[in-house]
Amino acid sequence: MDMDLTIVGGGAVGLAIAMRSAGKGSRVLLLERHSAFGRETSSRNSEVIHGGMYYPPGSLKAKLCVEGRRELYAFAGTRGVPARKTGKIIVAQDEAEIAALERIQTTGRANGVEGLDLLGKDGLSKRCPDLRAQVALWSPETGVVNAHRLMDALRVVAEEQGAVVLPGAEALGLEMIDGGWRVDFRDADGLQAVETAWVANAAGLNAQKVMRMAGLDPAEMGLTLHPCKGSYYSVRGKAGKRITSLVYPVPEEKLVGLGVHTIVDVAGGVKLGPDAEYVPEADEYDYAVDARRKDDFFRSAKRYLPFLEPGDIEPDMSGIRPKLYGPGEPERDFHIREERERGRPGFINLAGLESPGLTACLAIGKMVAETASG
Protein backbone atom coordinates (compact mmCIF):
# COMPACT_ATOMS: atom_id res chain seq x y z
CA MET A 1 0.00 0.00 0.00
CA ASP A 2 1.16 3.55 -0.80
CA MET A 3 -0.60 5.00 2.25
CA ASP A 4 -2.02 3.80 5.54
CA LEU A 5 -4.79 6.41 5.56
CA THR A 6 -6.22 8.69 2.91
CA ILE A 7 -8.54 11.47 4.08
CA VAL A 8 -11.08 13.09 1.78
CA GLY A 9 -11.79 16.62 2.99
CA GLY A 10 -9.53 19.30 4.40
CA GLY A 11 -11.63 21.17 6.92
CA ALA A 12 -10.79 21.28 10.63
CA VAL A 13 -11.84 17.67 11.15
CA GLY A 14 -9.92 16.29 8.17
CA LEU A 15 -6.79 18.21 9.17
CA ALA A 16 -7.11 17.03 12.78
CA ILE A 17 -7.40 13.43 11.58
CA ALA A 18 -4.27 13.92 9.47
CA MET A 19 -2.35 15.37 12.40
CA ARG A 20 -3.43 12.69 14.86
CA SER A 21 -2.80 9.82 12.43
CA ALA A 22 0.60 11.09 11.29
CA GLY A 23 1.50 11.55 14.94
CA LYS A 24 0.93 7.82 15.45
CA GLY A 25 3.40 7.05 12.66
CA SER A 26 0.87 6.37 9.90
CA ARG A 27 1.53 7.31 6.28
CA VAL A 28 -1.20 9.87 5.63
CA LEU A 29 -2.54 11.58 2.52
CA LEU A 30 -5.18 14.32 2.73
CA LEU A 31 -7.11 15.44 -0.36
CA GLU A 32 -8.92 18.79 -0.37
CA ARG A 33 -10.75 19.77 -3.54
CA HIS A 34 -10.54 23.52 -2.93
CA SER A 35 -7.35 25.53 -3.37
CA ALA A 36 -7.36 26.35 0.36
CA PHE A 37 -8.41 24.41 3.45
CA GLY A 38 -11.70 24.77 5.30
CA ARG A 39 -13.39 26.83 2.60
CA GLU A 40 -16.83 25.52 3.51
CA THR A 41 -18.23 24.69 6.96
CA SER A 42 -15.02 25.09 8.98
CA SER A 43 -14.48 28.72 8.01
CA ARG A 44 -18.13 29.80 7.91
CA ASN A 45 -19.40 29.42 11.46
CA SER A 46 -19.49 31.13 14.85
CA GLU A 47 -15.93 30.01 15.74
CA VAL A 48 -17.25 29.15 19.20
CA ILE A 49 -15.48 26.68 21.47
CA HIS A 50 -18.57 25.08 22.95
CA GLY A 51 -18.93 24.05 26.57
CA GLY A 52 -20.99 20.93 25.88
CA MET A 53 -24.20 21.54 27.83
CA TYR A 54 -26.75 21.03 25.07
CA TYR A 55 -26.06 17.47 23.90
CA PRO A 56 -27.65 14.28 25.28
CA PRO A 57 -25.42 12.58 27.87
CA GLY A 58 -23.61 9.62 26.35
CA SER A 59 -23.84 10.97 22.80
CA LEU A 60 -20.78 11.45 20.62
CA LYS A 61 -21.55 15.15 20.47
CA ALA A 62 -21.41 15.41 24.26
CA LYS A 63 -18.31 13.24 24.75
CA LEU A 64 -16.28 14.65 21.87
CA CYS A 65 -17.27 18.26 22.56
CA VAL A 66 -16.09 18.21 26.18
CA GLU A 67 -12.94 16.24 25.40
CA GLY A 68 -12.22 18.30 22.29
CA ARG A 69 -12.77 21.62 24.05
CA ARG A 70 -10.12 20.87 26.65
CA GLU A 71 -7.68 19.69 24.00
CA LEU A 72 -8.39 22.67 21.76
CA TYR A 73 -7.53 25.25 24.41
CA ALA A 74 -4.29 23.39 25.14
CA PHE A 75 -3.37 23.04 21.46
CA ALA A 76 -4.14 26.69 20.78
CA GLY A 77 -1.94 27.73 23.68
CA THR A 78 1.06 25.69 22.54
CA ARG A 79 0.77 26.57 18.84
CA GLY A 80 -0.04 30.28 19.10
CA VAL A 81 -3.60 29.98 17.78
CA PRO A 82 -5.76 32.94 18.87
CA ALA A 83 -8.36 31.61 21.32
CA ARG A 84 -9.88 32.90 24.53
CA LYS A 85 -12.46 31.97 27.11
CA THR A 86 -15.06 34.68 26.73
CA GLY A 87 -17.65 32.80 28.74
CA LYS A 88 -21.23 32.37 27.61
CA ILE A 89 -24.49 33.62 29.09
CA ILE A 90 -27.74 31.81 28.22
CA VAL A 91 -30.67 34.08 29.07
CA ALA A 92 -34.21 33.13 30.13
CA GLN A 93 -37.10 35.58 29.96
CA ASP A 94 -40.03 33.70 31.57
CA GLU A 95 -40.88 30.69 33.74
CA ALA A 96 -40.91 28.22 30.84
CA GLU A 97 -37.47 29.38 29.70
CA ILE A 98 -36.15 29.26 33.27
CA ALA A 99 -37.24 25.62 33.51
CA ALA A 100 -35.50 24.92 30.20
CA LEU A 101 -32.38 26.66 31.49
CA GLU A 102 -32.32 24.43 34.56
CA ARG A 103 -32.55 21.37 32.30
CA ILE A 104 -29.60 22.65 30.25
CA GLN A 105 -27.59 23.05 33.46
CA THR A 106 -28.46 19.49 34.52
CA THR A 107 -27.48 18.12 31.12
CA GLY A 108 -24.25 20.09 31.13
CA ARG A 109 -23.25 18.79 34.53
CA ALA A 110 -24.01 15.23 33.43
CA ASN A 111 -21.68 15.82 30.47
CA GLY A 112 -18.87 17.05 32.70
CA VAL A 113 -19.13 20.74 31.79
CA GLU A 114 -17.33 22.76 34.42
CA GLY A 115 -18.51 25.84 36.31
CA LEU A 116 -22.13 26.13 35.15
CA ASP A 117 -23.79 28.67 37.40
CA LEU A 118 -27.35 30.03 37.46
CA LEU A 119 -27.49 33.82 37.86
CA GLY A 120 -30.41 35.82 39.14
CA LYS A 121 -30.94 39.45 38.20
CA ASP A 122 -28.35 40.68 40.69
CA GLY A 123 -25.71 38.24 39.52
CA LEU A 124 -26.43 38.97 35.88
CA SER A 125 -26.30 42.71 36.52
CA LYS A 126 -22.83 42.38 38.02
CA ARG A 127 -21.57 40.27 35.14
CA CYS A 128 -23.31 41.94 32.21
CA PRO A 129 -25.54 44.87 33.23
CA ASP A 130 -26.75 45.65 29.71
CA LEU A 131 -28.57 42.34 29.20
CA ARG A 132 -32.30 41.78 29.73
CA ALA A 133 -33.19 38.47 31.43
CA GLN A 134 -34.96 37.01 34.46
CA VAL A 135 -32.37 34.29 35.00
CA ALA A 136 -29.20 33.34 33.13
CA LEU A 137 -26.81 30.39 32.96
CA TRP A 138 -23.11 31.26 32.98
CA SER A 139 -20.65 28.93 31.23
CA PRO A 140 -17.07 30.07 31.99
CA GLU A 141 -15.42 27.43 29.79
CA THR A 142 -17.08 28.54 26.55
CA GLY A 143 -14.91 30.65 24.26
CA VAL A 144 -13.88 31.48 20.72
CA VAL A 145 -11.06 30.56 18.36
CA ASN A 146 -9.72 31.85 15.06
CA ALA A 147 -10.75 28.93 12.84
CA HIS A 148 -8.39 29.85 9.99
CA ARG A 149 -5.38 30.01 12.29
CA LEU A 150 -6.45 26.75 13.91
CA MET A 151 -6.53 24.98 10.54
CA ASP A 152 -3.17 26.47 9.58
CA ALA A 153 -1.66 25.06 12.78
CA LEU A 154 -3.23 21.62 12.25
CA ARG A 155 -1.82 21.51 8.72
CA VAL A 156 1.65 22.58 9.82
CA VAL A 157 1.83 19.96 12.57
CA ALA A 158 0.44 17.25 10.28
CA GLU A 159 3.11 18.03 7.67
CA GLU A 160 5.84 18.20 10.31
CA GLN A 161 4.86 14.67 11.25
CA GLY A 162 5.06 13.46 7.66
CA ALA A 163 1.50 13.78 6.35
CA VAL A 164 1.08 14.70 2.68
CA VAL A 165 -1.56 17.43 2.53
CA LEU A 166 -2.81 18.37 -0.94
CA PRO A 167 -5.06 21.36 -1.63
CA GLY A 168 -6.63 21.48 -5.07
CA ALA A 169 -6.91 17.68 -5.14
CA GLU A 170 -10.39 16.31 -5.76
CA ALA A 171 -11.33 12.70 -5.07
CA LEU A 172 -13.01 11.18 -8.14
CA GLY A 173 -13.52 7.53 -7.27
CA LEU A 174 -13.06 4.80 -4.66
CA GLU A 175 -12.56 1.11 -5.39
CA MET A 176 -12.13 -1.73 -2.93
CA ILE A 177 -8.94 -3.71 -3.51
CA ASP A 178 -7.21 -6.51 -1.66
CA GLY A 179 -6.33 -5.13 1.78
CA GLY A 180 -7.71 -1.66 1.26
CA TRP A 181 -8.84 0.92 -1.29
CA ARG A 182 -7.76 2.57 -4.52
CA VAL A 183 -8.48 6.31 -4.53
CA ASP A 184 -8.57 8.14 -7.86
CA PHE A 185 -8.15 11.91 -7.72
CA ARG A 186 -7.23 14.90 -9.82
CA ASP A 187 -4.69 17.50 -8.78
CA ALA A 188 -2.56 20.12 -10.55
CA ASP A 189 -0.59 17.35 -12.25
CA GLY A 190 -3.67 15.64 -13.69
CA LEU A 191 -5.25 12.27 -12.88
CA GLN A 192 -3.64 10.34 -10.03
CA ALA A 193 -4.31 7.19 -8.02
CA VAL A 194 -3.18 5.93 -4.64
CA GLU A 195 -3.61 2.62 -2.83
CA THR A 196 -4.44 2.98 0.83
CA ALA A 197 -5.37 0.69 3.70
CA TRP A 198 -7.97 3.08 5.11
CA VAL A 199 -10.15 5.91 3.80
CA ALA A 200 -11.70 8.58 6.03
CA ASN A 201 -14.69 10.43 4.61
CA ALA A 202 -14.31 13.91 6.14
CA ALA A 203 -15.90 15.71 3.20
CA GLY A 204 -18.52 17.59 5.23
CA LEU A 205 -21.17 18.93 2.88
CA ASN A 206 -19.94 16.50 0.20
CA ALA A 207 -19.91 13.42 2.46
CA GLN A 208 -22.82 11.86 0.54
CA LYS A 209 -20.84 11.98 -2.71
CA VAL A 210 -17.94 10.18 -1.09
CA MET A 211 -20.28 7.55 0.34
CA ARG A 212 -21.65 6.93 -3.14
CA MET A 213 -18.08 6.61 -4.50
CA ALA A 214 -17.57 3.86 -1.92
CA GLY A 215 -20.69 2.03 -3.12
CA LEU A 216 -22.91 3.08 -0.22
CA ASP A 217 -26.40 4.58 -0.43
CA PRO A 218 -26.81 7.41 2.11
CA ALA A 219 -30.60 7.21 1.98
CA GLU A 220 -30.65 3.48 2.74
CA MET A 221 -28.24 4.08 5.63
CA GLY A 222 -30.33 6.90 7.08
CA LEU A 223 -27.50 9.32 6.36
CA THR A 224 -29.15 11.74 3.97
CA LEU A 225 -27.67 15.17 4.56
CA HIS A 226 -29.91 18.23 4.83
CA PRO A 227 -27.85 21.38 4.11
CA CYS A 228 -28.93 24.19 6.40
CA LYS A 229 -27.86 27.76 5.74
CA GLY A 230 -27.12 30.08 8.63
CA SER A 231 -26.61 33.80 8.10
CA TYR A 232 -24.95 36.36 10.36
CA TYR A 233 -25.30 40.10 10.90
CA SER A 234 -22.49 42.21 12.34
CA VAL A 235 -23.11 44.62 15.23
CA ARG A 236 -21.47 47.99 14.61
CA GLY A 237 -20.25 50.90 16.66
CA LYS A 238 -21.05 51.55 20.29
CA ALA A 239 -23.61 48.74 20.51
CA GLY A 240 -20.95 46.14 19.74
CA LYS A 241 -18.63 47.53 22.40
CA ARG A 242 -21.27 46.88 25.07
CA ILE A 243 -21.06 43.12 24.48
CA THR A 244 -18.08 41.24 25.93
CA SER A 245 -19.39 37.66 26.35
CA LEU A 246 -21.26 35.26 24.12
CA VAL A 247 -25.00 35.65 24.71
CA TYR A 248 -27.50 32.95 23.74
CA PRO A 249 -31.26 32.69 24.12
CA VAL A 250 -32.80 29.50 25.48
CA PRO A 251 -33.30 27.28 22.41
CA GLU A 252 -36.91 26.90 21.36
CA GLU A 253 -38.33 23.40 21.05
CA LYS A 254 -37.62 21.84 17.64
CA LEU A 255 -35.46 24.82 16.75
CA VAL A 256 -32.98 23.84 14.04
CA GLY A 257 -30.10 25.57 15.82
CA LEU A 258 -29.48 27.34 19.12
CA GLY A 259 -31.33 30.49 18.12
CA VAL A 260 -29.92 33.83 16.98
CA HIS A 261 -27.15 34.50 19.47
CA THR A 262 -24.43 37.09 19.96
CA ILE A 263 -20.84 36.12 19.18
CA VAL A 264 -17.71 38.00 20.17
CA ASP A 265 -14.76 36.85 18.03
CA VAL A 266 -11.10 36.75 19.09
CA ALA A 267 -10.51 40.24 17.64
CA GLY A 268 -13.46 41.73 19.55
CA GLY A 269 -15.86 41.92 16.61
CA VAL A 270 -19.51 41.15 17.35
CA LYS A 271 -22.03 39.25 15.22
CA LEU A 272 -25.60 38.03 15.54
CA GLY A 273 -26.53 34.62 14.19
CA PRO A 274 -26.91 32.16 12.78
CA ASP A 275 -30.49 31.71 11.72
CA ALA A 276 -31.54 28.51 9.93
CA GLU A 277 -32.80 27.95 6.39
CA TYR A 278 -32.77 24.52 4.75
CA VAL A 279 -31.44 24.66 1.18
CA PRO A 280 -31.11 22.07 -1.61
CA GLU A 281 -27.93 20.01 -1.92
CA ALA A 282 -25.59 21.62 -4.45
CA ASP A 283 -22.07 21.40 -5.83
CA GLU A 284 -21.58 25.07 -5.01
CA TYR A 285 -23.69 26.98 -2.49
CA ASP A 286 -24.92 30.56 -2.47
CA TYR A 287 -23.45 32.27 0.59
CA ALA A 288 -25.05 35.67 0.03
CA VAL A 289 -26.86 37.08 3.07
CA ASP A 290 -30.45 38.14 2.46
CA ALA A 291 -30.79 41.73 3.70
CA ARG A 292 -34.54 41.15 4.08
CA ARG A 293 -33.80 39.02 7.15
CA LYS A 294 -32.64 42.07 9.09
CA ASP A 295 -35.94 42.61 10.90
CA ASP A 296 -36.00 39.00 12.12
CA PHE A 297 -32.44 39.27 13.42
CA PHE A 298 -33.19 42.55 15.14
CA ARG A 299 -36.37 41.30 16.84
CA SER A 300 -34.65 38.12 18.06
CA ALA A 301 -31.67 39.96 19.55
CA LYS A 302 -33.71 42.87 20.95
CA ARG A 303 -35.34 40.48 23.44
CA TYR A 304 -32.10 40.27 25.40
CA LEU A 305 -30.13 43.28 24.06
CA PRO A 306 -32.53 46.14 24.92
CA PHE A 307 -30.07 48.83 23.79
CA LEU A 308 -29.89 47.50 20.22
CA GLU A 309 -31.26 49.69 17.40
CA PRO A 310 -31.98 48.67 13.78
CA GLY A 311 -29.11 50.81 12.48
CA ASP A 312 -26.62 48.89 14.65
CA ILE A 313 -26.66 45.74 12.49
CA GLU A 314 -25.81 44.93 8.88
CA PRO A 315 -25.45 41.73 6.76
CA ASP A 316 -22.14 39.93 7.32
CA MET A 317 -21.57 36.29 6.24
CA SER A 318 -23.21 32.88 6.03
CA GLY A 319 -22.37 29.20 6.25
CA ILE A 320 -23.98 25.84 5.45
CA ARG A 321 -24.35 23.12 8.09
CA PRO A 322 -24.44 19.42 7.03
CA LYS A 323 -27.33 18.22 9.19
CA LEU A 324 -28.60 14.64 9.33
CA TYR A 325 -32.15 15.78 10.07
CA GLY A 326 -34.66 17.84 8.15
CA PRO A 327 -37.28 20.40 9.23
CA GLY A 328 -39.27 19.24 12.26
CA GLU A 329 -37.18 16.09 12.76
CA PRO A 330 -35.36 15.32 16.03
CA GLU A 331 -31.70 16.24 16.25
CA ARG A 332 -29.21 13.52 15.30
CA ASP A 333 -25.83 12.61 16.73
CA PHE A 334 -22.58 12.57 14.77
CA HIS A 335 -22.10 9.49 12.60
CA ILE A 336 -18.48 8.32 12.93
CA ARG A 337 -18.08 4.67 12.05
CA GLU A 338 -16.10 2.20 10.03
CA GLU A 339 -18.62 0.71 7.60
CA ARG A 340 -17.39 -2.88 7.90
CA GLU A 341 -20.87 -4.15 8.71
CA ARG A 342 -22.05 -2.68 5.40
CA GLY A 343 -19.35 -4.54 3.51
CA ARG A 344 -16.89 -1.63 3.34
CA PRO A 345 -14.01 -2.51 5.70
CA GLY A 346 -11.45 0.25 5.99
CA PHE A 347 -13.94 2.99 5.07
CA ILE A 348 -14.38 5.35 8.04
CA ASN A 349 -17.51 7.39 7.45
CA LEU A 350 -18.08 10.77 9.10
CA ALA A 351 -21.45 12.42 8.50
CA GLY A 352 -23.52 15.14 10.12
CA LEU A 353 -20.50 16.95 11.57
CA GLU A 354 -22.27 20.19 12.31
CA SER A 355 -21.77 22.02 15.61
CA PRO A 356 -19.86 21.18 17.80
CA GLY A 357 -17.61 19.76 15.08
CA LEU A 358 -15.06 22.58 15.23
CA THR A 359 -14.80 22.32 19.02
CA ALA A 360 -14.53 18.53 18.83
CA CYS A 361 -12.10 18.31 15.89
CA LEU A 362 -9.08 17.13 17.90
CA ALA A 363 -11.13 14.52 19.75
CA ILE A 364 -12.67 13.33 16.47
CA GLY A 365 -9.18 13.18 14.95
CA LYS A 366 -7.99 11.03 17.83
CA MET A 367 -11.00 8.70 17.52
CA VAL A 368 -10.47 8.16 13.78
CA ALA A 369 -6.70 7.77 14.15
CA GLU A 370 -7.19 5.05 16.75
CA THR A 371 -9.66 3.26 14.48
CA ALA A 372 -7.32 3.41 11.49
CA SER A 373 -4.36 2.11 13.48
CA GLY A 374 -6.26 -0.80 14.96
Image: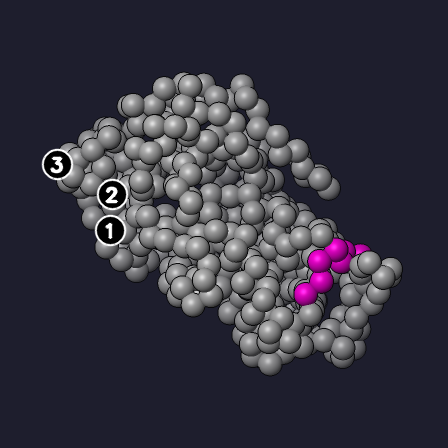
Q: What is the magenta range?
A: 165-172
Secondary structure found at label 1: loop
Disc 1 target residue: 116
Instruction: Point out residue 195 in the picture as x, y percentages from the top left corner.
Output: 78, 73
Contact between marks 2 and 1 (CB within 8 A): the answer is: yes
Disc 2 target residue: 137
Classified by dominant secondary structure, the portion drawn in magenta counts as strand
Q: Give the crowd class for mark 3: few <14, some 14-19, many >=20 residues within 10 Å.
A: few
- Where residue 122 is drawn, which disc sits there? 3
* Amino acid tagged 2: Leu
Q: Residue at x 28, y 23 (%)?
A: 306
Tell me if 100 is positioned left or right of 323 in this view. Answer: left
* Amino acid tagged 3: Asp
Q: Earlier in the sequence, mark 2 or mark 1?
A: 1
Coloring scheme used: one colour
Q: Earlier in the sequence, mark 3 or mark 2?
A: 3
How far separated are the C-alphas under marks 1 and 3? 17 Å
Tell me if 106 is positioned left or right of 237 in this view. Answer: left
Q: Residue at x 71, y 39 (%)?
A: 284
* Amino acid tagged 1: Leu
